[in-house]
Image (cartoon, rainbow, N blue to C red):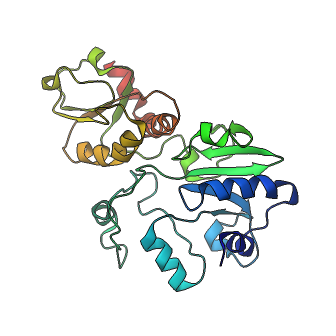
Amino acid sequence: LPEGEWLERVAQPLRQDRQLLAQLTERFWPGPFTVVLPKRQVIPDLVTAGLNTVAVRISAHPIFAEVVRTFGKPLAAPSANRFGRLSPTTAQHVHDELNGRIPLIIDGGPTEHGIESTIVIVRDGKIDILRRGSISYEQLAEFAEVNVVSTTGKISVPGQLKSHYAPNTPLCLVDNAANFASENLRVGLLAWNPVTDQNRFAATRLLSERRDYREAAANLFRYLRELDALDLDLIVAERVPAQRIGAAILDRLERAAHDSGQTRDRLE
């Protein structure tokens, strides 16, 4: 079926939102763009946790697209990681996280974007971002007024939780690691700025030598997993400028560091 017809089968866009929704899906589908819409009765409450809305996305990955075409129906596809933990970007990450909990893993290669899709609600001619992702605020602003929904109120999606995407190792977020010092701790560095003294850290990962946001996003969760596996006392991550997709990277780092606030305050 054409993409628009699939959407109509599972969701009921409001009449006043249809034109803007059509413009957005034409531009960003297939791709890392998720729209939350009123659901039709065909969608079981189990899929939506009892909510009257459903999040819809059309994947650009050829293997997943072929699975859906062969199945001939929409699929409910939760994240391939345990709640609140680091997102997987390779089949090995899924195996490490869920081995023994799921019967099958299809290896389609590493993820292209590295971070999750952008989740939005379209209403009254405006776009509300529920979760920042691979489609940036600036890209969406070409179509309508955009608002980033605060996470202090009701949580609509897991990506809005203050603590999320977290490694097991405490994570401390700083502006520049050159100003960070700690003694008697094994500390790993997730760097955005050029690293001038690697000897101060037990392990170092540089998100992007070219300071390329897309490359940094692709590396983010993989590098966090690598550092998390080294039995460190602390991971120090440098803030990424909140520009375009950099805002989504910074969002993930802030949520990963949320529960480590006491550690940060004690060491900085």
Q: Is residue 167 visible?
A: no
Residue 108: x %, y % from top left: 35, 68
Q: Residue at x 64, y 48 (%)?
A: 155
Q: Is residue 148 above or below residue 183?
A: below
**Res 196 → quadrant:** top left
Q: Residue at x 40, y 55 (%)?
A: 112
Q: Is residue 246 visible?
A: yes
* Badge count: 0
Task: Choose between 147 and 187: the one closer to the eye.
Answer: 147
Q: Residue furthest right?
A: 15
Q: Residue furthest top?
A: 179
Residue 46: x %, y % from top left: 63, 73
Quarter the C terminus occupies: top left
| Horizontal side, residue 60 vs residue 14: left or right | left
Q: Is residue 255 above or below residue 28?
A: above
**Res 201 → quadrant:** top left
Quarter the N terminus occupies: bottom right
Residue 100: x %, y % from top left: 31, 73
Q: Residue furthest left?
A: 199
Q: Residue at x 36, y 43 (%)?
A: 220
Task: Choose between 69 and 192: the one closer to the eye.
Answer: 69
Residue 223: x %, y % from top left: 28, 44
Task: Choose between 87 and 142: the one closer to the eye.
Answer: 142
| Horizontal side, residue 190 vs residue 265: left or right | left
Q: Residue at x 28, y 32 (%)?
A: 209
Q: Is residue 124 above or below residue 64?
A: above
Q: Is residue 61 above or below residue 111?
A: below
